[in-house]
Image (cartoon, grey):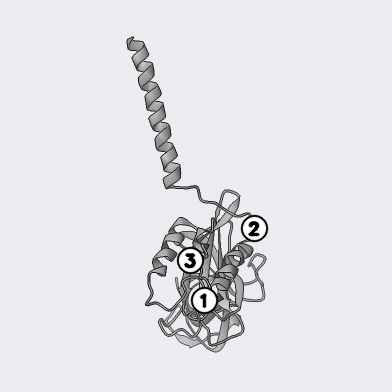
Amino acid sequence: MKKRNIIISIAGLVIIVGAIIALMFVAFPKQEVSQSDPVDIVLDFYTPWLEAKQSETTDPYTAGLLDEPFLGKELRSKLKKAQKDIENPIDPVLCQERSDIKLSTRSVSVQEESVQILVTARGDKSLTGQALIILNRLNDGWYIYDITCSPGEFGIDREFSFEQVGFLLKQSIPKPYNPENWHLVFKQDEQDGHVVPLFFAEDTMCTDLKGRESVCSTESFGEASKVSIKAQMTEAGAQVKKLEFVK
């Protein structure tokens, strides 16, 4: 009898543990991923979102676009919170006030476990907002981890939309980047290997290791030099305003 009671108790415990595991899967559903190209994943989300914004009969939330399975859990919560912020005219996905736009996408960082894609409004220079989308790899696919809005090249809310410390690379930059341009390789969110092309204007200022400031001469740059960059992110890359060499 005692042995039988132990067996019954063990069986009951197994059932309880199984129920707890089942509840955990319901409460914390598995993150779904897509095996498509990251740019295609972004466009498959952004295109219907823009269409819903332009529609006279629905909107992205009513259309159920937050149910997109390839959205990260935290991003989904972030967008639900933004839905309630009726005082903010900026759409949290398009990063624009207007919806009469056409989309342009560009990969700004490609690495093994994370990809960053910039989405901007194409063909209208007055629309300077931009969305930086981060996709993370999970198993054999990708999911949209986060979307961050910035004011763009002519934003007035902050002086610079891109500020990073990293290393200059040009001839040694790997494909698919263009070795004719300088690039900044930097670390972000504890992940190495982020890359952004750099563009310099006639008034871009550089500060050397001795603190002397002058107009930048890219011909004097050295491969793998450590620098601090202050720039405005554009569709093509980072338009550098200030560059400082650091130890």
* Image vertical order of residue 117 relative to residue 28, above or below: below
Q: Nearer the viewer, residue 212 or 79?
A: 79
In the image, what residue occupies the spot 49% across and 88% down? 214
**Residue topped by disc 1:** 130
Query: What secondary structure is found at the residue carrying circle 3?
Result: loop
2 and 3 marks in contact (CB < 8 Å): no
Instruction: Give the labeled residue for mark 2.
Output: 36
Closer to the camera in the image, 123 or 151: 123
Where residue 223 sits, quadrant-wise, is: bottom right
Quadrant where the N terminus sits is: top left
Of all residues, the one furthest to the top in this rendering is 1
Coordinates of residue 122 in the picture (x, y in percent): 60, 80
Locate residue 152, reporting x and y percent: 50, 80
Residue 176, given in percent of the width and then of the height, sits at 67, 66
The three-letter code of the residue at mark 2 reads Ser
**Can residue 222 be seen from the camera position used here?**
no
**Residue 234, image x, y percentages:** 55, 79
**Numbered disc 1: secondary structure:** strand
Residue designated by label 3: 61
Q: Nearer the viewer, residue 245 or 236?
A: 236
Lower sequence index among marks 2 and 3 = 2
Q: Which quadrant, please, contains the C terminus?
A: bottom left
Which quarter of the picture shows residue 220?
A: bottom right
- The kind of residue on which mark 1 rests is Gln
* Marks 3 and 1, the one that precedes in the sequence: 3
Dot 1 alpha-carbon crowd within 10 angstroms: few under 14, some 14 to 19, many 20 or more:
many
